[in-house]
Image: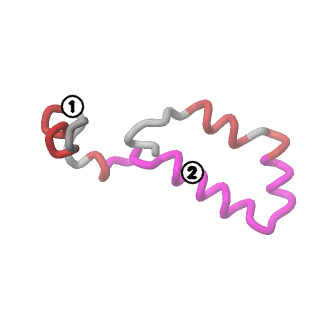
Amino acid sequence: MSKLEEVAPTSNIPADYQSEISFELKTLLVRCIANMLYNNNTNKGYCLDTELLPALFECTNMDARNP
């Protein structure tokens, strides 16, 4: 196992990847959905009926940009 400092210079990921729009996209979407569902039974019912969260998780990959 190497240190991140040793691995990062050899990777193809740019050093400023955190400033890209796709960084933490899944995390931001889940937070947004959670805020919309908080204390709102209508939205909760819609989310459950349409299976919104499972669809979101299937469409995004778990990687360094979407922890």
- Residue 36 percent location from the top left of the image: 70, 61
- In the image, what residue type sits under mark 2? Leu
- In the image, what residue type sits under mark 1? Asn
Mark 1–mark 2 distance (CA, rounded to whole Å): 26 Å
Q: Is residue 9 magenta?
A: no
Query: Circle 2 — which element?
Result: helix
Query: Circle 1 — which element?
Result: loop
Disc on the earlier residue, 1 or 2? 1
Instruction: Name the one closer to the observer, 17 or 64.
Output: 64
The residue at which mark 1 appears reads as 12
Magenta portion: prevailing SS class: helix
Magenta segment boundaries in residue numbering: 20-47
Q: Which mark is residue 20?
A: none
- Residue 8 percent location from the top left of the image: 19, 40
Residue 65: quarter of image: top left
Residue at image coords 58%, 31%: 59
Left or right of 56 on screen, residue 22: left
**Label 1 CA crowd tier, 10 Å (few <14, some 14–19, many 20+):** few
- Residue 15 percent location from the top left of the image: 20, 45
Residue at image coords 52%, 51%: 27
Residue at image coords 44%, 49%: 24
Left or right of 45 on screen, residue 53: left
Q: Which mark is residue 29?
A: 2
**Label 2 CA crowd tier, 10 Å (few <14, some 14–19, many 20+):** few
Q: Is residue 42 magenta?
A: yes
- Residue 53 percent location from the top left of the image: 69, 42
